[in-house]
């Protein structure tokens, strides 16, 4: 049975390392600073307040955590960048779409509006891939609907289009500071990719594995 991914969490004994992805024990330590000054050898180390480090038992790499609330002693990992707080992209997305997708994830916490803008760009590229040629995304979605696009996917596409557009040009909708909205866009892109790319791909691959005789029979039937 596949092990469940455990997100990095402050002071947790074990989680999936953000470097090697292995579920591994973590060693925790305060952070100290020792100046590298040849003119003052042997200078004592200084405790760096509000920072801690964790070290992975498996890969020996370090993660750096900063205190975000002194009162509640809350810490957030700032190195390496934590990709666990947003859904990972569908594997069948093109590399350029994945690049924009990940960039949207890296700025999600600091700029939900910027993240939504990048996700709308992902949708635009995805639609252009599905409906090649010139044309507005609004009308390209209409073409997909005429071809029998499921209502669920049409709504997801228009949801992403409208929310992303309004996140770039605020006014009618107040979405520019909403992380929840940006997270919804991540899920929507993956839903679109799963339904319109991954699922047809899996069906096609399975279909091509049918015996040649059966494939020929089906071809003859459809040509009648």
Image (tube, grey):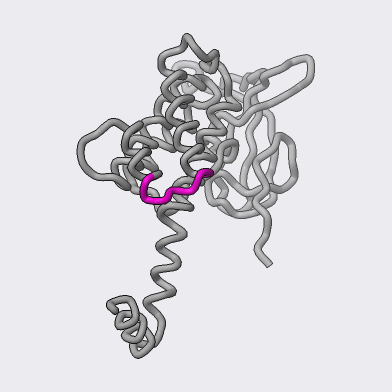
222 or 76: nearer the viewer: 222
* 97 up-or-down from 34: above or below: below
Taking the spot 38% from the left edge, 87% from the top edge, the residue there is: 214
- The percent coordinates of residue 57 (x first, y second) are 64, 51
Instruction: Residue lying at the far left in this picture: please name it.
Output: 134
- The percent coordinates of residue 210 (x first, y second) are 41, 83
- The percent coordinates of residue 86 (x first, y second) are 56, 37
**Magenta residues (range):** 146-152
Where's the C terminus, which quadrant? bottom left
Instruction: Residue lying at the far bottom in this picture: please name it.
Output: 213
Taking the spot 48% from the left edge, 25% from the top edge, the residue there is: 163
223 or 10: nearer the viewer: 223
Where's the N terminus, which quadrant? bottom right
* 122 up-or-down from 200: above or below: above
Taking the spot 21% from the left edge, 41% from the top edge, the residue there is: 133
Instruction: Residue lying at the far top in this picture: please name it.
Output: 171
Find out whether residue 78 is within the magenta segment. Answer: no
Instruction: Residue lying at the far right in this picture: please name it.
Output: 72
* 121 up-or-down from 58: above or below: above
Quadrant hosting residue 74: top right
């Amino acid at each position: 049975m596949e092990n469940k991914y455990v997100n990095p969490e402050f002071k947790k004994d074990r989680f999936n390392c953000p470097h090697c992805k292995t579920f591994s024990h973590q060693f925790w330590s305060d952070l100290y600073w020792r100046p590298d000054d040849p003119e003052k050898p042997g200078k004592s180390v200084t405790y760096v307040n509000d920072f801690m480090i964790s070290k992975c038992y498996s890969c020996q790499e370090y993660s750096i955590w900063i205190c975000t609330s002194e009162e509640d002693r809350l810490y957030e990992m700032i190195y390496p960048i934590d990709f666990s707080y947003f859904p990972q992209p569908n594997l069948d997305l093109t590399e350029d779409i994945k690049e924009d997708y990940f960039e949207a994830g890296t700025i999600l916490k600091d700029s939900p509006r910027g993240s939504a803008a990048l996700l709308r760009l992902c949708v635009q590229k995805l639609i252009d891939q599905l409906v090649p040629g010139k044309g507005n995304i609004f009308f390209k979605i209409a073409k997909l609907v005429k071809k029998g696009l499921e209502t669920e996917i049409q709504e997801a596409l228009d949801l992403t289009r409208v929310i992303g557009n309004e996140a770039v040009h605020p006014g009618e909708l107040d979405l520019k500071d909403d992380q929840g909205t940006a997270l919804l866009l991540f899920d929507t892109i993956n839903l679109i990719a799963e339904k319109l790319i991954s699922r047809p791909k899996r069906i096609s691959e399975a279909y091509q594995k049918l015996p040649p005789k059966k494939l020929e029979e089906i071809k003859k039937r459809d040509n009648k």
